[in-house]
Amino acid sequence: MTWSVWRVSPFITGIFFILGVFTLYQVMYDELKTILRAKKIKVDEDKVNAYFGVTYMGIFIISMQAILVGTPISWQFMNFQLIALVFCAYFLNIRVPYYIFFPIMVVYMLFNGSIGYWESWCHGVTLVAFYSTLNMIRRRQHNDHPFLAYILSGIFFGSLLWFFMKIKFGFSMSTYWEELSYFVIFGTLLYSYVDMILRDSKLRMHLLEFANHDALTKTENYAAYVAEIRNLFDLSTENNLQLSMMMFDIDHFKHVNDTYGHLAGDKVLRHVADVVQTVIAENDPHVKLYRTGGEEFNVIFPGYDLQSTEVIVRQIFMAINHLDVKVNDKTIALTISVGVSTISQADLEPNDFYSRVDGNLYYSKKNGRMQITAK
């Protein structure tokens, strides 16, 4: 087997290896996000991405270096390390102050026994410059050809980095060009592959958002309500936590549709949702609004007993009952009926809680509408 054939085989293996590494990363990161969301843990996803990405890539690089440290072929896997750096700097967009790099660089060179080589110092400084440049390109990614800036920076710094490796290890120019070519191909494949994964991830997030949101009012819908109330109900019953709920619907909404048309009815629903969202935002963003039926809305109050809900419920009630919606040259005056209740030890499942709140709403409607029943 010739040298060139032997080199091509690891190259192909390396492509699949790198794509596998980043596929595993995406799968693990998506699973982590799913777990955090299922447990309703509020976190900054950018920070989670940064810490998880650095930890994952750090384990990957150190593991490879530990296998090869002290061997005469340790330089052969430098492209994998460079690709890991590209992934963290460009695709994860992890911003690290430049002065943090130097102690990391010293520790790394002590680990692999290269701290006494001037070529290694040049290599390290160039890596820092490469990382910072990729970060800058990503932050200023407003041009029409982002890939061009990405790949040109890779070629420039890749040439420098492999030049220092050539001096240190003394391999031939043909090997130098071969390794640089592999790096450029790796970088190109990575760009295409990660871009595809991220676009797919964004699409799935948009689909999830669409599935959980009402297209007309932009509030969360009945499916989102069911998932949330089930989770909050379990947390409340298991940990003896307070949980209350408000249910309201627009009085005589069928008359609005029949008299003014469905477009007018849609406008009324949007106005009502906007007013309620404004009241909630001014009081407590943890309180959530859901459109659970045609003109029916639910408001969930995590951590609230019945008395604690009164301020927000009254504000919503007064705001909508003084709301006039103009449709063409007509003015539609709105009122709502409201039912409110809090979780009880007698509630065996979320529907028990829902039924009691719904019963209070029905009582308000049956006894004249435009009133609040809370018990």
Image (cartoon, rainbow, N blue to C red):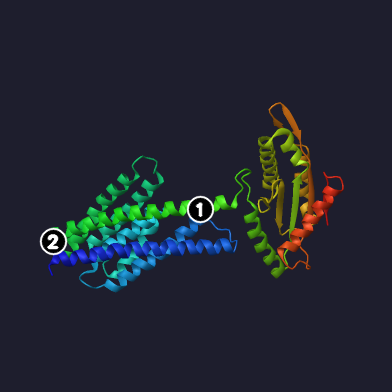
Question: Horizontal placement of 261 versus 27: left or right?
Answer: right
From the top left corner, tell me how far across and down residue 217 is, in percent.
Answer: 64, 43
Within 10 Å of disc 1 (Cα), the crowding (few <14, some 14-19, many 20+) is few
Q: Quadrant of the C terminus?
A: bottom right
Q: CA distance from mark 2 to mark 1?
A: 49 Å
Q: Residue at x 62, y 43 (%)?
A: 216
Badge 1 marks a residue whose secondary structure is helix
Badge 2 marks a residue whose secondary structure is loop
Query: Which residue matches tag 1?
Result: 205
Q: Let me know if residue 95 appears in the view.
A: no
From the top left corner, tell me how far across and down residue 262 is, in percent.
Answer: 67, 37
Callout 2–callout 1 Cβ contact below 8 Å? no
From the top left corner, tell me how far across and down residue 134 is, in percent.
Answer: 35, 50
Q: Amino acid at mark 1?
A: Met
Disc sitting over residue 159 in the figure: none
Question: Horizontal placement of 202 versus 345: left or right?
Answer: left
Disc sitting over residue 172 in the figure: 2
Sooner in the amino-acid sequence: mark 2 or mark 1: 2
- The foreground one among 86 and 287 is 287
Q: Amino acid at mark 2?
A: Ser
